[in-house]
């Protein structure tokens, strides 16, 4: 029913290890599984492009100084299904979870790229807070945000996804529910707002994955703050 309508790139992309990735850089995913195809079809209908259905954000122990994150290792902060629920990659607590969590980036990319119909892309932040802010302030803010948003359940309430996708429906949204559940682009947007990558007047609950790529319905995502999209793969 929710068959993908676009042509997926034929596994184009460079080795992600050839890029210099930093905290806050955006990671975009496309997949032909049931949930991903459903989201991409809705995006295609609403904004004219359904290239990506999921986003996450690079994180390292440079900005998050606890939880056993290893030196010189990339992780991804995302709201998603993990472990036994999906690709087998558990979070840093070695648990299966449905919601906000940190996972090993190398393992996530490897598992995602194994799907012949998937696509992965990177949009690096041009004026990255790691380079423009005092690193101690960045760490303090990230510690707070991690404590606030980690382990929040993914949005299992379908109407909340429709409210984000279709602005006329937002008047029916119950405000207090916005932080009780969190979908992928909402989590990333919460962090981006805190660090000035998105404006403070932006409502993170209104941001969908394609807002970082195509025309944003709310004109809140300034794509000039991001580098060009680069497709990547897991290549040894």
Image (cartoon, rainbow, N blue to C red):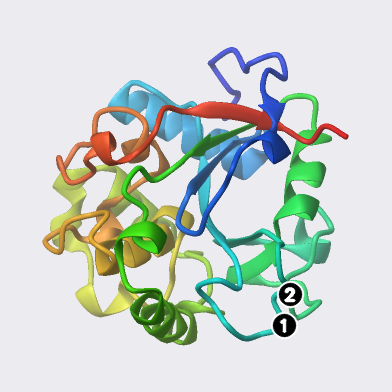
Circle 1 SS class? loop
Q: Position of residue 199 (x, y in %)?
A: 16, 57
Residue 142: image quadrant is bottom left
Q: Are marks 2 and 1 in contact (CB under 8 Å)?
A: yes
| In this view, the mark in front (2 or 1) | 1
| Residue at x 38% of width, y 75% of height | 138
Circle 2 SS class? loop
Q: Residues within 10 Å of mark 1 (few under 14, many from 20)?
A: few
Q: Nearer the viewer, residue 213 or 138?
A: 138
**Which residue in the protein does label 2 denote?**
92
Image quadrant where one finds the N terminus: top right
In this view, 222 is above or below 145:
above
In this view, 116 is above or below 179:
above
Q: Position of residue 79 (x, y in %)?
A: 54, 63
Q: Nearer the viewer, residue 23 or 54?
A: 23
| Residue at x 15% of width, y 64% of height | 200
Residue 68: mark: 1
In this view, 42 is above or below 199:
above
| Residue at x 13% of width, y 59% of height | 171
Image quadrant where one finds the C terminus: top right
Decide if residue 126 is on the left or right side of residue 97.
left
Decide if residue 109 is on the left or right side of residue 6.
right
């Amino acid at each position: 029913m929710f068959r993908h309508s676009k042509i997926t790139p034929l596994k184009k992309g460079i080795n992600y290890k050839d890029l210099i990735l930093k905290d806050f850089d955006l990671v975009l995913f496309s997949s032909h599984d049931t949930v991903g195809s459903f989201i991409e079809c809705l995006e295609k209908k609403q904004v004219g492009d359904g290239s990506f259905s999921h986003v996450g954000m690079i994180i390292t122990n440079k900005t998050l100084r606890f939880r056993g994150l290893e030196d010189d290792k990339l992780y991804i902060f995302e709201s998603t299904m993990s472990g036994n629920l999906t690709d087998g990659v558990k979070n840093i607590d070695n648990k299966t979870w449905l919601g906000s969590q940190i996972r090993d980036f190398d393992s996530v990319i490897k598992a995602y790229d194994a799907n012949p119909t998937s696509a992965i892309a990177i949009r690096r932040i041009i004026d990255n807070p790691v380079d423009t802010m005092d690193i101690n302030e960045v760490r303090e803010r990230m510690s707070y945000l991690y404590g606030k948003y980690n382990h929040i359940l993914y949005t299992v309430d379908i109407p909340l996804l429709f409210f984000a996708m279709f602005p006329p429906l937002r008047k029916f949204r119950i405000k207090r529910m916005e932080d009780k559940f969190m979908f992928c682009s909402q989590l990333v947007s919460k962090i981006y707002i805190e660090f000035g990558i998105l404006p403070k007047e932006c409502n993170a609950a209104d941001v969908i994955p394609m807002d970082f790529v195509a025309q944003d319905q709310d004109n809140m995502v300034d794509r000039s703050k991001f580098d060009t999209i680069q497709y990547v793969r897991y290549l040894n």
